[in-house]
Image (tube, rainbow, N blue to C red):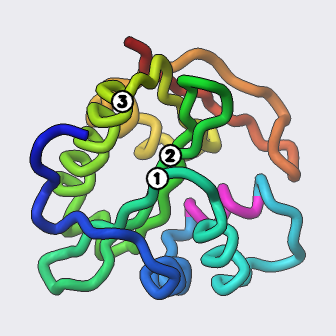
Amino acid sequence: MPAKPPSNLIACSAWHLLYLCERMRPDEIEQYMAFYPAEKFDPEVAAIGFMNTPGMKFTLLGPDNLPACAGGYHEVLPGVWQSWMVGSCDGWKDGWRAITKASRWMMEGLFEMGARRLQTNALASRTKALEWYERGLKLKREGTWFKYGLQGQDVALYSRTV
């Protein structure tokens, strides 16, 4: 990892994830429901699923010292890492710059550790998230999986490589 993490970046815990899943943004809930079959969104089930995702996890604290977002990467093939993230409405509104800085720090660390590709995906309808991937995280759009989501949503694919 790069030498010094942002001071508000800490190890992720199940409590952080439950806190965030209970305050998840509506577009993130919609995306979660597009990938995980369930009749309705359950914050506890989502938090457990995120906590059980293998790989690296982090929580970014907001100015109020509460979780603003949590996320991480898991290795899907040697050198290829898939991202995930969950954030609260207030966390994104008040801390998008800090979230961007922490995410970039994590990405650079993965590249330093030998990653050759970092990737993410999102519902193609999440235009602000897609813009952040490109402008904030310097990811490149690779294409779209048409009708991929459980309700037939299109999913945009992004990556950054070394």
Task: Estimate how packed mark 2 is, as few (under 14), some (14 to 19) or many (20 or more) residues with alpha carbons within 10 Å.
Answer: many
Residue 123: where, in percent of width, then height? 64, 43
Residue sitting at 68 percent across and 61 percent down?
A: 32
Q: Is 7 drawn above or below residue 132 in the view shown? A: below
Q: Magenta segment, which residues?
A: 27-33
Residue sitting at 66 percent across and 27 percent down?
A: 77
Q: Nearer the viewer, residue 80 or 65?
A: 80
Residue sitting at 64 percent across and 83 percent down?
A: 43
- The amino acid type, in three-letter code, at marker 3 is Met
Quick check: 77 left or right of 36? left
The chief SS type of the magenta part is helix
| Residue of label 2 | 73
Which comes before the other along the chain, label 1 or label 2? 1
Quick check: 41 left or right of 137? right
Query: Dividing the image into 4 quarters, which one contains the C terminus?
Result: top left
At mark 2, the secondary structure is strand
Gap in Å between the C-alphas at discs 3 and 1? 12 Å
